[in-house]
């Protein structure tokens, strides 16, 4: 495998494939995705076309927000990347809790609170 391939990760979330980098997943070291790819993780990838792939049995609908959060974790305007409306924010909040992303969880909670006032 080439150096670049070693840094890429494929994540199959409920049948939908996402591709990202190890660095992106490690942007929140306390999160489930970072711990999932660590060397001592009990969750092991399978290889597809020289690309390490992980399967996560979750609804893929909001996983793009999880990845975008990790890709933009250092940007103050991250809240603007979240959709409007409390129903969808509450669904993303469930995913943030599952993936143990405290920062995304706080963003969702804050935005939900804004809609409720």
Image (cartoon, grey):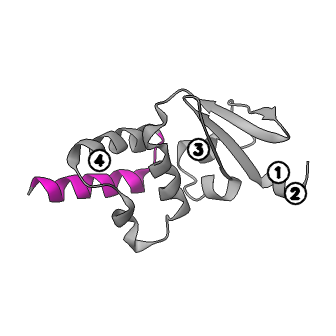
Measure how far apart labels 2 and 1 are at the Cα level. Answer: 5 Å
| Residue 17 drawn at (x, y percent) | 62, 38
- Which residue is tagged 3? 33
Instruction: Looking at the image, tell me whether mark 4 or mark 3 is earlier in sequence order.
Output: 3
Q: Residues within 10 Å of mark 3 (few under 14, many from 20)?
A: many
Q: Going 35% across and 57% down the picture, which residue do you hit?
A: 82
- The residue pinned by badge 1 equals 6
Q: Position of residue 31 (x, y in %)?
A: 53, 47
Asked if disc 2 and disc 1 are in contact, CB closer than 8 Å, the reply is yes
Question: Tags 4 and 3 in contact by the CB under 8 Å rule?
Answer: no
- Residue 91, located in which quarter of the rendered image? top left
Residue 115 sits above or below residue 53 on the image: below
Inspect the magenta stretch and tell me whether residue 108 lies in it: yes
Q: Say which element carries label 1.
A: helix
Q: Distance between the Cα atoms at labels 1 and 4?
A: 34 Å
Q: Residue at x 54, y 29 (%)?
A: 14
Q: CA distance from mark 4 to mark 2?
A: 37 Å
Instruction: Give the labeled residue for mark 2.
Output: 3
Locate residue 69, reporting x and y percent. Answer: 47, 57
Q: Nearer the viewer, residue 31 or 6?
A: 6
Main secondary-structure element of the magenta-colored stretch = helix
- The range drawn in magenta is 99-116
What mark, if any, has residue 89 been given in the picture? Answer: 4
* 20, above or below 63, in the image: below
Disc 2 to disc 3: CB gap under 8 Å: no
User: Tag 2, which secondary structure?
Assistant: helix
Asked if residue 80 lies in the magenta stretch, the reply is no
Answer few, some or many: residues within 10 Å of disc 2's Cα (few below 14, many 20 plus, some between 14 and 19). Answer: few
Going by the image, does 24 lie left or right of 95?
Answer: right
Mark with earlier residue (3, 1): 1
């Amino acid at each position: 495998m080439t150096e670049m391939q070693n840094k890429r990760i494929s994540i199959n979330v409920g049948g939908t494939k996402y591709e990202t980098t190890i660095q992106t997943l490690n942007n929140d070291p306390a999160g489930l995705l970072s711990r999932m790819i660590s060397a001592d993780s009990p969750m092991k990838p399978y290889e597809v076309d020289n690309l390490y792939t992980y399967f996560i049995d979750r609804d893929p609908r909001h996983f793009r927000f999880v990845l975008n959060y990790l890709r933009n974790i250092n940007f103050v305007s991250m809240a603007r990347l979240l959709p409007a409306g409390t129903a969808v924010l509450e669904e993303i909040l469930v995913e943030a809790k599952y993936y143990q992303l405290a920062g995304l969880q706080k963003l969702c909670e804050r935005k939900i609170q804004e809609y409720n006032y």
